[in-house]
Amino acid sequence: MKGYRPLLIENLGISLPGMEVLRLQLNQHLERTGPGNHSHGYGQLLVYLRGEGAQILDGQRYDARSGTVFYAAPGKHHGFERHQSRRPLCLVLDVKFKRVRAERKPNVIGTLPATSLNHIRSRVTQLVAMRDIGEADRQFSVGGIILDILDSLLRSVGMLNARPALPSGRNSLTRSAEKLIISCLDDPSANLAFLAKKLGYQRDYLNRVLKSQCGLTLGQLRARIRLGEAQRLLGKGKSVGDVASAVGVDDQNYFARWFRRQTGSSPSAWRN
């Protein structure tokens, strides 16, 4: 994430089977919060988006770096010690589980893969940008983004059931789809029907299998890859028109609108 703008979204009122999401905040840790110096009456999911240090959970010290996820259960003391490096940026979700069983493991730690970490960073950028638009325009979008982030965090610490194992041969389908999408990303004629045919599956069935493996449909998987490549090229200073062509979008204006929907900012603003 480029730059930093503090973020606090309170009174979310997001209720799910077995849990409630209370608030979300984006913090930039200062010098030191001290080992185990505070606790809450609710649980906290913490993911470090950059920087490094040490997270203290109930008296135990754990390394914290980009992509590390922690869950601190209600009443468990926790704190943070900063290392002599870039100031850490931490995303925190305050959650309350409705069943005691979810609280049996008070200190839960996980690590996000690079793709998931980058996806969460992009989603946080969207949330930050949404502060500048009207409440009516963002009330539904905010909830969807937070649920998307929550899914990745809960899976990383093993607090959601693992996706069911698929028959032999299908576990590589997501990787095959990713490779195919990347190979023809700059081809506007390579639509979803073309991709499904090249993979040898009927599109609806393909979407179901991909959804069970990676949580995304074919279209969503392509959008994530397209966004990642667009951000990479914009970061290298490429023009908006060149980036649009490189990710298979002929219409530069359409690309700009699509990019804004994905990130909350225009391509030129994101590049700058």
Image: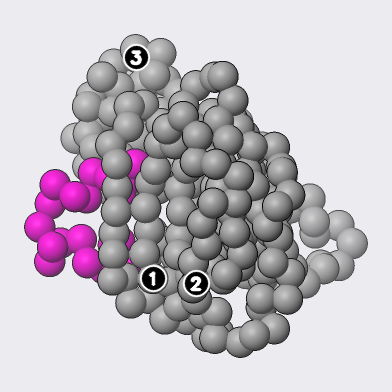
Q: Which residues are magenta?
A: 125-143
Q: How many marks?
A: 3
Q: Majority secondary structure of the magenta segment?
A: helix
Q: Which residue is mark 3?
A: 238
Disc 2, disc 3: CB below 8 Å? no
Q: Are marks 2 and 1 in contact (CB under 8 Å)?
A: yes
Task: Tell me the amino acid under the disc marked 3.
Answer: Lys
x, y percent for residue 269: 22, 27
The spot of residue 186 in percent (x, y) is 46, 29
The type of residue carrying mark 2 is Tyr
Q: Does the stretch in magenta take in 131?
A: yes
Residue plotted at (70% across, 52% down): 59
Q: Left or right: 176 with respect to 132?
A: right
Q: Earlier in the sequence, mark 2 or mark 3?
A: 2
> Which residue is at a point 10% across and 57% down the rendered structure image?
134
Foreground of the two, 136 or 185? 136
Q: What residue is disc 1 on?
A: 22
Which of pointers 1 and 3 indicates the residue nearer the eye? 1
Mark 2 vs mark 1: give the one in front: 2
**Residue assigned mark 2:** 42
Residue in the picture at 47% in, 81% down: 16
Residue 112 painted magenta: no
